[in-house]
Image (cartoon, rainbow, N blue to C red):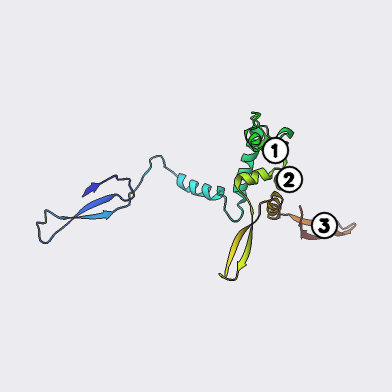
């Protein structure tokens, strides 16, 4: 068997010698076949590829829908960068010039400490209300998607319903897990028991 071309090329050609009844069997007619290569990387010795696939799916931002893991990752990166450059300040928020805001950098480099403090002291509701702002939305091209039925095509269509941070923030808050609201409606003195009811909190 003879080989032609780069063995790592996706259309790597391999020549197989096929017998020709009209000629000597020692000779043959070349048959060209497209043979996909078998690539091996000696650096991959375990489950690196499985991890890469899972990591890519977890951290990917869908065009329609919400991936809370990907959103949280980018929000923490946003907080770290803002703090590193000293942008959580009145001087920065008072700026209206886009170029000045883009080049604003106090070089504080304390972002890592801030994100650990946020993780320790904030829960989801305050985290979203505090740090999901219009700048974060514009940077990652986020929007609130709507869904409507197209009777002419008999299909559902998705469209950009809003790019306002208030609408997007409320959409995220509506997806939060709200724990049950337990209330005592009748106590039974002397028995150590009571009657209670449960319900879901609509607003955290």
Discs 1, 2 touching: Cβ within 8 Å: no
* Residue 47 shows in the view: no
Badge 3 element: strand
Q: Residue furthest right?
A: 189
Which residue is denoted by mark 1 in the rendering? 96
- Distance of label 1 from label 3 (alpha carbons): 49 Å
Which residue is denoted by mark 2 in the rendering? 126
Closer mark to the observer between disc 2 and disc 3: 2
Badge 1 element: loop
Which residue is denoted by mark 3 in the rendering? 183
First in sequence, mark 2 or 3: give its number. Answer: 2
First in sequence, mark 1 or 3: give its number. Answer: 1
User: Which residue occupies 55% across, 49% down?
Assistant: 60
Discs 1, 3 touching: Cβ within 8 Å: no
User: Which residue occupies 22% across, 52% down?
Assistant: 15
Crowd around label 2: few <14 · some 14–19 · many ≥20 (10 Å) = few
- Distance of label 2 from label 3 (alpha carbons): 24 Å
Label at residue 58: none
For residue 110, which quarter of the picture? top right
Q: Position of residue 48 (x, y in %)?
A: 46, 44
Above or below residue 155? Residue 175 is above
């Amino acid at each position: 068997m003879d080989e032609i071309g780069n063995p790592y090329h996706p259309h790597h050609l391999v020549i197989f010698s096929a017998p020709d009844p009209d000629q000597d069997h020692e000779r043959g007619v070349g048959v060209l076949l497209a043979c996909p290569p078998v690539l091996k990387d000696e650096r991959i010795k375990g489950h690196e590829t499985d991890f890469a696939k899972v990591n890519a799916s977890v951290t990917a931002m869908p065009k329609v829908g919400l991936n809370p893991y990907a959103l949280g990752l980018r929000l923490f990166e946003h907080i770290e960068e803002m703090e590193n450059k000293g942008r959580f300040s009145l001087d920065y928020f008072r700026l209206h010039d886009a170029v000045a805001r883009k080049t604003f950098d106090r070089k504080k480099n304390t972002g890592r400490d801030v994100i650990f403090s946020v993780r320790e002291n904030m829960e989801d509701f305050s985290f979203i209300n505090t740090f999901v702002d219009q700048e974060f939305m514009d940077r990652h091209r986020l929007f609130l998607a709507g869904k409507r039925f197209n009777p002419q095509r008999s299909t559902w269509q998705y469209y950009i319903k809003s790019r306002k941070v208030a609408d997007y923030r409320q959409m995220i808050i509506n997806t939060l897990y709200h724990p049950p609201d337990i209330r005592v409606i009748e106590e039974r003195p002397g028995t150590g028991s009571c009657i209670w009811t449960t319900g879901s909190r609509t607003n955290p």
